[in-house]
Every structure is written in C-alpha cells, then in structure tokens.
Image: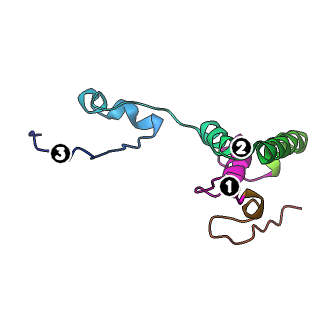
Amino acid sequence: SRPCIIHPSFQCIVHVESNQLDDIPAPFLNRFEKFQLNVDDILSWQLSRLPPGINGILSDVLLECEELLSHMGNGSIWSTSPNQTLKSLFISMIPPDIDGSHVSQCIGHGYANQPIRSSVL
C-alpha cells in the first residue's frame, strides 16, 4: 500500500466473521478498533431505544417465548442457530429507525410496514 490523502470525515467499517480472523493479516487488523457483536447485543440495543413500558412488555414476551420454546424443545422450530432465532425475530419486529414516539403502531409490522404473518400456531 502507499500513503494517500483521506478526507477527514472518512469512515470505514470492516465486517469479518469470527471464524475468518485467523486468515486476516495482523497488520491489517491492527489498524482498526475491534468489536464483537452478537444477537444479544443487537437486541439489547434495540430494546433500550424503546420507551420503558414497551421495552418491558417485549422483554417479558421474549422470556415467555423462550420458556415455551424450552418446553417444546429446540427442534420445534427450524433454525441454523437455535439460541438466536427467537431473538432475531424480535429484532425484526422493531423498525431500525424507531425513536419511541410511534412504537406501538410499528411493533406488529416489519420493516416495510407490512403486517407480520406467522403460521406457527
């Protein structure tokens, strides 16, 4: 590589799966801050952006769903990652641009503001 001028507001995010870290040269990795994110981190962040009442309701519903799933067994839903599927569904119910002012209208809709339909029950 060769030095070049970079705009002062330039930002870069490098997304790497944890199983690929050993294959990436250390000098490249050392140029960046490293953060490890998982589904729990994203869900906590999404819930923290909601008003306390709705945050509490969704947290309680998630706990009840996890308890139901534990009674039914992880094989009761198809998933490549059984411990993350339910949380991923909850993440998808919260629009990414939510500011808390119209959450109650949005919880039952996906990103495209289309009703979420399920054939689980």
**Magenta run includes residue 36:** no
Check the image and report above or below for 83 versus 116: above
The amino acid beneath tag 1 is Ile
The amino acid beneath tag 2 is Pro
Q: Which one is nearer the viewer's eye here, 9 or 36? A: 9
**Magenta run includes residue 95:** yes
Cα–Cα gap, marks 3 and 1: 36 Å
Q: Quadrant of residue 74?
A: top right
**Badge 2 element:** loop
For disc 2, the neighbor class at 10 Å (few under 14, some 14 to 19, many from 20) is some
**Badge 3 element:** loop
Q: Which residues are magenta?
A: 77-102
Which marked residue is nearer to the observer: mark 1 or mark 2? Answer: 1
Question: Which sits earlier in the primary sequence, circle 3 or circle 1?
Answer: 3
Which residue is labeled 1 in the image?
94
The amino acid beneath tag 3 is Ile
Q: Which one is nearer the viewer's eye here, 118 or 11? A: 11
Cα–Cα gap, marks 3 and 2: 43 Å
The numbered disc on residue 6 is: 3
Q: Quadrant of residue 83?
A: top right
The numbered disc on residue 82 is: 2
Residue 55, horizontal then vertical, whole percent: 76, 44
Residue in the image at 78% along x and 68% along y = 117
Residue in the image at 58% along x and 38% along y = 38
The numbered disc on residue 36 is: none
Q: In the image, 32: left or right of 7?
A: right
Cα–Cα gap, marks 1 and 2: 20 Å
Residue 91, horizontal then vertical, whole percent: 67, 50
